[in-house]
Image (cartoon, helix red, strand yellow):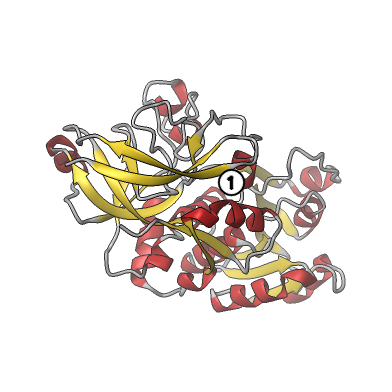
Amino acid sequence: MAFKSVSFVADGKGNGQPREFSIPDCPADGVIMQVEMCGICGGDPYIFRGQHPHSHYPLVMGHEMIGRVAAIGKQAAAERRLAEGDRFIVEVMIPCRNCDMCLAGWYHLCRRSEQYGVSRPVEHAPGTWGAYGNYLCIDPRSITHRVSGEVPVERAVILAVLANGVRWAQLARVSIGDCVVIQGPGPQGLCSTVACKTLGADVILMGRAADRERLEMGRRLGADHVVCVEEGDPVARVRELTNARMADVALENSGAPEAVEVGLKVLRPRGRYVLSGYSGDKPVTITKDEIAKKELEVLGGWGQAGGFIPGIKIIEEGRFPLEIMVTDRFELPQAAEGISRVADGRVGMKGVVLPPKA
């Protein structure tokens, strides 16, 4: 069965518009997703403006997707254990499965760097390699996960971000009783909060005065304490909250260059620090001696590898109302406006793009 998709195409110069695509019949190893909702990633403005190093244009944007199986080939159905109508999510990376990184298990660092909604242009048939639209074509090399259809779609669409938070917590080896400082109360920070609370940690969530509503949302999602870094010394506040023991782990989710120095100082000796927030290639000034004197472990974090299966369990259990993060909805013709609002910080927490009505 052939499908028609109206999808949002970006030209890499800050312009975009809906365009109709014809999607051919599904091959034996293929899957076609009918998109239910797609999140607007904090990186989407860079893709929209042509500033992403892996993008080729024109392309259909959107990589934080949730949807249903519209069509699936027999081979894919058997291998993926999916059937028409099932809800599922596909990981953003399209691994080559042959390079040294893929073969070592680090498929999110695949040398080809192919990603949905990022790297494949519309000239790569059938063109709908992004989820801003009705349908998304799934490459046979992709990794898919079944998701309960009973979960509210607003909670399910957070999965792509939650998988990041799970990965940061895994990299930092967060465990029961750890004190974790999370820097930045955006979608990444709040999902990191949920991941760390699931693992039994105590969470101190940091943000600015302008983030007050986001900090309060963080409380609703499990943060034990919130700290405004502009209202007193945040390092002194962590010292007070931990009875001078300081934090076992810090997760830098804000991307603010000045946050790194604070993160190093809030850690106890032998603490672990994961840096996942992007600073737009701005240089960061730190007191390097903090790392040496305390024997800190400092790691970079990128990608969602290994985060989806635990993330799905979290959303299906329903302990955390992650759906409250979806604050701004944009119809497909408003996708450019939604991207602009995310870029300027003019969304409550998380913006999403809705597919056109069939």
Query: Residue 313, can we see it?
Result: yes
58 to 152, vertically: above or below: above
Viewed as shown, does residue 287 lie left or right of 198?
right
Task: Return the residue at label 1.
Answer: 44
**Of the pair 89 and 221, the residue shown nearer to us:** 89
Residue 138, x across and y down, in percent: 32, 38
- Amino acid type assigned to the residue bearing label 1 in the image: Asp
Q: Quadrant of the N terminus?
A: top left
Rendered location of residue 142, percent (x, y): 34, 36
Residue 23 drawn at (x, y percent): 28, 37
Residue displayed at 38% across by 38% down: 128
Quadrant housing residue 144: top left
* Nearer to us in this view, 129 or 332: 332
- Asked if 119 appears above or below 280 in the picture, the reply is above
User: Is the C terminus in the top left, top right, bottom left or bottom right quadrant?
Assistant: bottom left
Instruction: For label 1, count other residues whose C-alpha is less than 10 Å away and answer few (under 14), some (14-19) or many (20+).
Output: many
Residue 270 vs residue 260, the one in the foreground: 260
Residue 67 position in % (x across, y down): 33, 55
In which image quadrant can residue 289 be found?
top right
Q: How many marks?
A: 1
Res. 252 in view: no
Of the pair 98 and 90, the residue shown nearer to us: 90
Instruction: Report the side of 235 relative to 149 (left or right).
Output: right
Residue located at (38% from left, 21% from top): 98
The part of the image, by quadrant, that contains residue 305 is: top left
**Secondary structure type for disc 1:** helix
Name the outermost residue toward the top.
99
